Structures are given as structure tokens and as C-alpha cells.
Image (cartoon, rainbow, N blue to C red):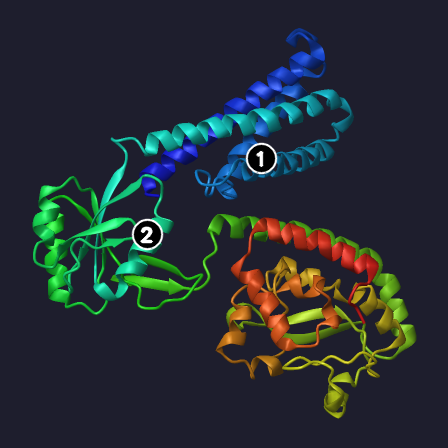
Amino acid sequence: MNRRKKIVESYCLLFVDLITITVSYILALLLRYHKFSRVMEPELHFMGCICFLLFCTIYSFMLDWNRDFLTRGIFVEFIAVLKFNVFMAVAFSSVLFVIQRGVDFSRLVWGYFTVFDIILVWLARLLTKKALRAYFMSQYNQVKIMIITKDAVLNKTVSQLKKSLDINYEIVALACVDVDRKGVVVDGVKVTADGANVIEMARQMPLDEVFLNLPEENMEYVKYIIYELESMGISCHFNIDIIDRPQKEVRVGRFADYTVVTYSINHFDYRRMFLKRLLDIVGGLVGLLLTGIMMPFVALAIKLDSPGPVFFAQTRIGKNGRRFKIYKFRSMYIDAEARKKELEQQNEMQGLMFKMENDPRITKVGKFIRKTSIDELPQFYNIVKGDMSLVGTRPPTEGEFEQYNSHYRRRISMTPGLTGLWQISGRSDIIDFDEVVKLDLEYIDNWTLGLDIKILFQTVWVVLTGKGSK
């Protein structure tokens, strides 16, 4: 969707959500107290409404929960509204906990509001969806577009555009410039022009935009087409893809005074990355507090069990090849690294990682703190520092990294994490490094803040049950 229509959709939905939340809150107050003059702790309840409205604004723009709004179905919309209310309830609970006013806020008001808000926001959004669809598809807002392409990519171009274009686009003409295909119907669109008369046809018909997909075409001809169309006031979209692969992000911009096309297989919205980092800092500080509480007991047990330092530090590979020191509670004897070469023949892992179920280098205390993941607690320091994230991919050792191919290297294109898909999918039960890479790339390609939160909750369950740990 073009920028203007995206802005219309975003602000229209925000306005509808804010109005609906306000109405739901007023109904909840009236149902509980019957009159505003009877509301107990009025300043607190007024603050509650402000918090809900503020959360809605932040949630809308930082998490972009309106993505694909016009195309998603009724049930998907209901689930989105339900998730929104769950996160809002968690956020408001945190506020009440911080200010220590939870007992003063009416539980009935909160309950009534939640029910009203889920129903009214859902219904309001369905009506808004219907209104926006009618608005964007109206005669005055519909964008009429012509496709100019070549015979080799004719079918693919039409099919992909029909599948991917927003609802406000209408394909009104199709031109094949290298072969005379006039009269042929491709996926419901008729070829009406060739290379000789495409400009004349564009000049005579209602037309807003043109999409050009002309691979390996003479650039002088392409320039001619674009110049002619631009002179008519018609916007041109010229396909510049030189690679064909999924999940890529292409951006046109400026780089050191050059106009460049930037290709990237990963693209993470800065707003979501900011929230991810904020979550890391908060979670890391809580984790450091927990580490500080447990450290005297763990340190004493480690010292009594075997000679050597309490902490184990090792150079690991972080985001895009950056080196950093990772910290753990020591779970092995101090000569563990030297003895690793002797045990490489007993490696139970296929590929670049080393795993051994009954590793003789692990101390008695080490077995316990590994089983319970207590040995990982010092990594909260790495998280607060920024070397790691709460959720991410496993940071490889230098030895592993030196053997990486291009496919393996992509797993470090995101900040490594304390936990991730690999850890909650069996950990030691996985014996193939390629499976670890597959899970890491699945995480990178499908990353959302919601996925991070889901993995964190599943990690707690995995740690408590000891699933997959050895």
C-alpha cells in the first residue's frame, strides 16, 4: 500500500481504537458505580483510562498490530484484539504494582472494561475494515495500473502482481514488448499492446501508474519508456531485482552521496528492535539480581567440589562476527579445554558442535547446575552489556566459527541469545548441527517480539522440567 493510504489506515484505526477504549471504560465505570460522582478513587480510575489510551498508541505504532488489516479475516481479527487486551492487562498490572495501588483499583471496572473492550474494539474494527475497503476501492481512490513486461516473464509477473497488490489497485492494461501477444488473456488480464504502440495506448487510456518488468532489456529503450510515461504524469515502478530469493529486503536510498539499492535477507524494524533491547535490559537486570542472590551458594558448592575459579570465561562469536567474552558458572574441571581433543572421537553431535552425554570433564556440581541451567546465570551480565539478548541464536566458539560456510554464518546475523528455538526444542536431544542451524534461521526469518515472549515462557517450562538437558 502506498504511503498516503498507509497513513490513512493507521491513523483511522488508532482513532477508532482510542474512541472505543474510552467508550468501553465509561460503560465499565457506569455499570459498576452508576454515576461518575460515586466513583471511588477517581484520580486512580482516571489514570487507568489514560494508561489504556497511552498503551494503545504505543502498541499501534511500535508493534504495528495493524499489518495486513484489510486482508485478514474475522477470526484472525478477534485473536489480534484478544492479544492486544492481554498485553494491555499485563502492562497495566505492572503499573499498579509499581505504584502499589492495585488494591485501590476496582476489579469489577477492570473486568467489565476488558469484556466491553474486546467486543467493541472487534466490532468497531470490522466496521472500519468494511468502510476502508469501500473507500480504497471506490472509483476516485482506485489506482489504475499497466504492466509492461517481456514474454519470458509475462505469466509470472501478472500472477505475482495480482497476488501481492493492495486492494486499491486495478490492472487495466498489459503490454508484451518483445513478442506480439495482443489478444492473449493472462490470468484474467488481456494483452492489449506491444513494444510499438505501448506509449500510444498509455497516452489514450485512464492510467495512474505503470509497472515495468523488463529483465535484460536494452537500457536505452527502458529510459525511453520511463521518460515518455513520466512526461504524461504517470508514476513508474521499474523492477530492479537482480536476485530471486525469499525473505529479502530491498531498499533504495543514499549511501555516501550515491543512490544505491540495498539488498538484505534480514530486515528488522528499528521500533521493534528498540523494544527488544529494552526487554533485554529489564530482563537482564532482574536476572543479575537473581544471580547475585544465588551466587554465594553456587560459588561455595563449586569451590568445595573442585579447585579452580567460580566463573568460566570464553571468547564467543556475536552478531556478524564480533568477539566477546561469555561468562558462566564453571561446571567443568579446569583442564577441560585441554582434554577436549582426547574426547573428540566420542562426539555425539554431527557437525561443528561438541556434545557428549557422559562428559568426564564435568564436575559433580557441574552436572547439577547444567541440568538446572544455573550455570547460564552469569550471562545476564552479557545481556545487560549488549553482547547477548534474552532470546536469539546460540553463540558459537571461535573454533566452530572458523569452519562456517556462508549458510552457517547467517545464524550470527542476529544478536545471540541466552535461549532460543534450539534450547526449547530438545537441546541435547538434537544431535545434528544442521538441525540447530535450521532452528536458528527459522527464528531469524520469523522473528517478532511475540515469538521472543513465547520462547521465554517455554524456556521457563523447559528449565523446570529439565526437558532435553543432559
Give the position of the N terminus as an image quadrant.
top left
Per the model, the C-alpha gap separating discs 1 and 2 is 29 Å
Badge 2: residue crowd in 10 Å (few <14, some 14–19, many ≥20): some
Give the position of the C terminus as an image quadrant.
bottom right
Residue pictured at 53% horizontal, 35% vertical: 74
Q: Which residue is mark 2?
A: 161
Residue 300 vertical placement versus 100 (above, below):
below
* Of 451 and 413, the residue lying toward us: 451
Q: Is residue 228 visible?
A: yes
Residue 29 vertical placement versus 398 (above, below):
above
* Residue 368 as seen in the image, left or right of residue 202: right
Amino acid at dot 1: Phe
Residue pictured at 75% horizontal, 23% vertical: 107
Relative image position of residue 83 (x, y in whole percent): 62, 39
Q: Is residue 324 visible?
A: no
Residue 429 placement: quadrant: bottom right
Residue 262 placement: quadrant: bottom left
* Residue 376 as seen in the image, left or right of residue 232: right
Amino acid at dot 2: Leu
SS state under label 1: helix
Of badges 1 and 2, nearer the viewer stands 2
Residue pictured at 51% horizontal, 80% vertical: 405
Relative image position of residue 98 (x, y in whole percent): 71, 35
Q: Which residue is mark 1?
A: 78
